[in-house]
Amino acid sequence: MANLVFPDAILVKNYISGDESALTSLIERHQSKIYGFIYSKVNDRDLSDDIFQDTFIKVINTLKTKSYNEEGKFLPWVMRIAHNLVVDHYRKSNKMPFNRETEEYSIFNYMSDNAPTIESKMITDQVEADLTRLLDELPEDQKEVLIMRMYQDLSFKEISELTGVSINTALGRMRYAVINLRKIIEKNQIILTN
């Protein structure tokens, strides 16, 4: 008998009806995408494992209580749960992932200083601290969209799916974040140089 590939919606329905293997198929199908997303936000294997597990505990609980109603949109729904758990983690630990220094991206990769001195390290630390303080002055929804767009390089479509708002709302939040940052910079008389 050929191995049939069922759409997510059918697997969800089968799992709700009591077929445990349907959930296993869903997890296997989307594991790398969901885990990769979580890891890209927290950059820590153990923490990623925990958040991945917590994500599927929430998924199972929601499906078991039959309160899942996003027919045909299983992956964006799970990604939104994962995103919310990542945000919860940073809220609890009271730090947002601005200083996410990874091999692929750091703003300081674009500044060349072949012999880092104590002075240049202090300046770098100060710039990061100032930038973090500026972003902290933004409303939470604007800060979230700005970080996802600028630091995590997500499209507005991805941002809208992860935050559960329309693309226009995500675009509006980004626009207001930029306007508010300009106002904060002017208010504090910060001089930005190229």
Image (cartoon, rainbow, N blue to C red):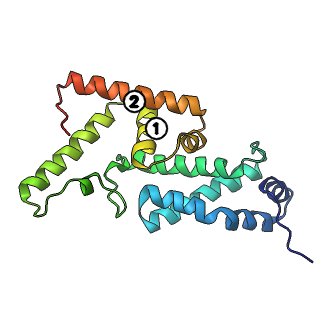
Q: Label 2 amino acid? A: Ala
- The answer to whether residue 44 is left or right of residue 50 is left
Q: In terms of image quadrants, where is residue 175?
A: top left
Task: Decide: few, some or many residues near mark 2? Use Cα within 10 Å; few <14, some 14-19, many ≥20.
Answer: many
Q: Which residue is mark 2?
A: 177
Q: In terms of image quadrants, where is residue 160?
A: top right
Answer with mark 1 or mark 2, whichever residue precedes in sequence.
1
Q: Label 1 amino acid? A: Val
Residue in view at x 58 percent, y 59 percent? 34
- The answer to whether residue 25 is left or right of residue 161 is right
Residue in view at x 59 percent, y 65 percent? 32
Q: Position of residue 14 (x, y in %)?
A: 85, 58
> Residues under labels 1 and 2: Cα distance?
8 Å
| Towards the viewer: 27 or 16 | 27
Residue 103 numbered mark, or none: none
Q: Secondary structure at mark 1?
A: helix
Residue in view at x 37 percent, y 61 percent? 104
| Towards the viewer: 126 or 87 | 126
- The answer to whether residue 191 is left or right of residue 9 is left
Residue 145 numbered mark, or none: 1
CB-based contact (under 8 Å), mark 1 and mark 2: yes
Q: Position of residue 137 (x, y in %)?
A: 32, 31
- Most extreme residue toward the bottom, as rendered? 1
Residue in view at x 17 percent, y 25 percent? 189
Image quarter in which the C terminus is found: top left
Q: Position of residue 102 (x, y in %)?
A: 35, 61
Task: Decide: few, some or many residues near mark 1? Use Cα within 10 Å; few <14, some 14-19, many ≥20.
Answer: many
Q: Secondary structure at mark 2?
A: helix
Image quarter in which the N terminus is found: bottom right
